Amino acid sequence: MKVRERALRFLLPADSDCWLALLRIGLGLVIVLYTWPLRSDWNYLFGGTGEGLASRRLFEALLSTQSPFVPRLGWLVFLCRQAGWEESFALSFAWSLLFAAGLFLLLGLFSRPAAITAWFLQLAAAKSGGLLSYGADNLITIGLFYLMIAPLPDRWSLDRWKWPGRAIDPRSLGLHRRVLQIHLCFIYFFGGLTKCLGVGWWNGANIWRALTLPPFDVLPTAWVASGSAFLPLLGISVCLIETGYAFLIWPKWSRQTVLIAVCAMHVAIGLMT
């Protein structure tokens, strides 16, 4: 009985909706910052074969061999063509919808429809982009999925004005947060485990390539070469931080340290690549 009670307390902790508001605002900001710089290049990146940098039709054809149900921008292009509109209009429409969804998430207005729209279009763009997508796109997709099914609206959203007396069960908020936390632990653990199985993270070769290969060679190669002795240490640190996160994020004595280490790792990645 005690085991059952502990499990329920762990899975259904009473929680506020502050984390949900931060998740909504953060993801809205990410979507806006993701789409706005691409406003003039969106059609070029996702144009069809022979028209766009990413050769969307090629990547979508390869994607169809894995599953015909994965969202892709080609679906929207097809629907627009049935209505007599060109591919360029469809792609511009997709960009406008995604950008608008990000703004609505920032404001907390029509939060759930905005989250669903942002999730679908961001996933479609990531899958249609093929080699132009990377790990951050997967994390954005995961975050938008959890926001899409979360008990919205939160206290900081404009939607709360429409339902001022609506109360959300604190245990429901706690459950959604806990599932997201557990999912994040799996992501870091298996990501770190995969790195541990590769030699490149132990001898620093992967760090070297990440810092010197275009277009991520922000630092001068001479600077990286001068500190090459520390590259294996950096690679091993990444492996330890990611695999250890799943276990060290829970105890109070290690939570703050591992959280600072993970945040510092991502900030360094953002600044140096």
Image (spheres, helix red, strand yellow):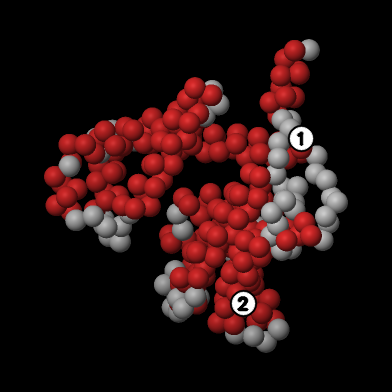
For marks 1 and 2, give the one nearer the viewer. 1
Density class for disc 1 (Cα within 10 Å; few <14, some 14-19, many ≥20) is some
Label 2 near label 1: C-beta < 8 Å?
Answer: no
Front position in the image: 163 or 192: 163
Image quadrant assignment for residue 97: bottom right
Residue 60 in view, yes or no: no
Q: Position of residue 130 (x, y in %)?
A: 47, 61
Q: Residue furthest right?
A: 165
Q: Position of residue 122 (x, y in %)?
A: 58, 61
Secondary element at image label 1: helix
Q: Count numbered badges in the picture.
A: 2
Distance between mark 1 and mark 2 Cα atoms: 39 Å
Q: Position of residue 64 (x, y in %)?
A: 58, 60
Front position in the image: 260 or 128: 260
Secondary element at image label 2: helix
Residue 171 shows which numbered tag?
1
Residue at position x 65%, y 82% in the image: 81
Please give the residue where the numbered disc 2 appears in the rendered image: 93
